Image (spheres, rainbow, N blue to C red):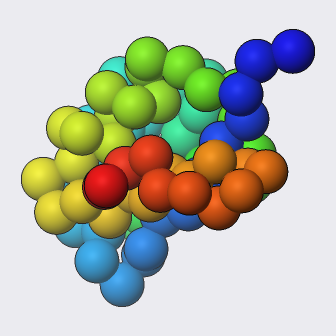
Amino acid sequence: MGDRWHVEVDRAVCISSGFCAGSAPEAFRLDAARQSHPREDELDASESVLAAAESCPVEAILIQMAETGDPVFPD
């Protein structure tokens, strides 16, 4: 079994760019106010989720290792 990540979106920081949902729709969705939400609290580690976090213009997406809480992004 691969690594699992705990993913959060700080909606106080999110500017509704939609890059995350556009680049990783399997992991992120936008609500009616265009605020981002992870589809699940824990996701399989993947390049698309990391790319979505890196593409966020305000770094509103936080990724940690699910088991240890160690930061993945931002580091």
The quarter of the image holding the C terminus is: bottom left
Residue at 36%, 84% (x, y): give it.
12
**Is residue 22 visible to the viewer in this orientation of the structure?**
no
Q: Position of 74 compared to 11: left or right?
A: left
Residue 11, horizontal then vertical, whole percent: 42, 75
Please name whichever residue, 74 or 37, is drawn nearer the observer in this view of the structure: 74
Query: Which residue is situated farthest in the right direction here?
Result: 1
Q: Position of 71 compared to 69: left or right?
A: left
Total labels drawn: 0
Residue at 61%, 26% (x, y): give it.
45
**Is residue 71 visible to the viewer in this orientation of the structure?**
yes
Tell me the quarter of the picture where residue 44 sits: top right
Residue 6, horizontal then vertical, whole percent: 67, 52
The answer to whether residue 12 is above or below residue 40 is below
Residue 16, horizontal then vertical, whole percent: 28, 59
The answer to whether residue 23 is above or below residue 7 is above
Query: Which residue is situated farthest in the left direction here?
Result: 57
Residue at 87%, 15% (x, y): give it.
1
Query: Which residue is situated farthest in the bottom direction here?
Result: 12
Please name whichever residue, 42 or 31, is drawn nearer the observer in this view of the structure: 42
The answer to whether residue 14 is above or below residue 47 is below
Please name whichever residue, 19 or 52, is drawn nearer the observer in this view of the structure: 52
Residue 8, horizontal then vertical, whole percent: 56, 62
Residue at 39%, 57% (x, y): give it.
61
Please name whichever residue, 32 or 65, is drawn nearer the observer in this view of the structure: 65
Q: Position of 2 compared to 74: left or right?
A: right
